[in-house]
Image (cartoon, rainbow, N blue to C red):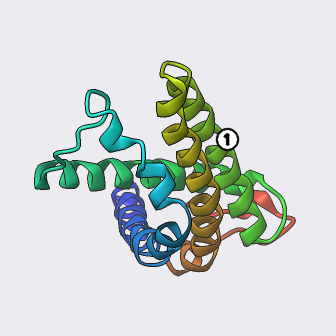
Amino acid sequence: MRSLETFLKLLFLVVLLNLVRYFVGGPIEGMTIMEPMHRVMPRFPEVFDTAFTRTDFAISLFYNFMLWFTVELVFHLLHPRLRGPLWVRSLKSYGLMLLFFCSLAAVYMNHYTAEVKSFYLWSMVDALILFPLLALANALLYPLFFRPPREGNPASSTP
């Protein structure tokens, strides 16, 4: 039963993190990277589906949710072993996942022409904006759901 409770807490926490992602991160993206990131899409309809339907939008929201759920799950499992205040541990864990995300984007980027590669480069810049933002939001929200271990005593975690 405790596992189910933890799972449900993580789900709700990730819902809140997604709200931060879209309502705080979205405007930041809109002012910074959205135009250059998406500029390439109409020029390469054979690569990018430019007829983005409601179903595509729902699937995109689900994939984004799963991305942040995975990032949060890694934090939940890893943070008791990290040192420093919760916000530092959150930045460390989310930074690890940022590195993974950018590495994966680079692998995909390597398969396309220079023009299409720019989309993946901009997605990495996007990640540089969103991962630290959500790491800090996580440091604020996580204690509302879970009791973090005291600094300097990583074994006292309550999952």
Measuring from the top left, give residue 52's x and y in whole percent: 19, 49
Q: Residue visible at 56% across and 62% down?
A: 130
The residue most toward the right is: 152
Q: Residues within 10 Å of mark 1 (few under 14, many from 20)?
A: some
Q: Residue visible at 69% across and 45% down?
A: 96
Tell me if 45 is positioned left or right of 154 in this view: left
Q: Residue visible at 12% across and 56% down?
A: 54
Quadrant (top left/top right/bottom left/bottom right) for the N terminus: bottom left
The residue most toward the front is: 43
Measuring from the top left, give residue 10's x and y in whole percent: 42, 62
Q: Nearer the viewer, residue 119 or 65?
A: 119
Examine the rendered structure and indicate whether residue 27 appears above or below residue 91. Answer: below
Tell me if 2 is positioned left or right of 117 in this view: left
Measuring from the top left, give residue 93's x and y in whole percent: 68, 52
Q: How many marks?
A: 1
Q: Residue visible at 83% across and 59% down?
A: 83
Quadrant (top left/top right/bottom left/bottom right) for the C terminus: bottom right
SS at mark 1? helix
Measuring from the top left, give residue 116's x and y in whole percent: 46, 32
Examine the rendered structure and indicate whether residue 78 appears above or below residue 152. Answer: above
The picture quadrant where one finds residue 32 is bottom right
* Identity, as a three-letter code, of the amino acid under mark 1: Leu
The picture quadrant where one finds residue 35 is bottom left
The residue most toward the left is: 54
Label 1 sits on residue: 99
Q: Nearer the viewer, residue 6 or 93?
A: 93
Examine the rendered structure and indicate whether residue 107 appears above or below residue 134. Answer: above
Q: Nearer the viewer, residue 30 or 54?
A: 30
Q: Nearer the viewer, residue 19 or 84?
A: 19
Examine the rendered structure and indicate whether residue 124 appears above or below residue 3. Answer: above
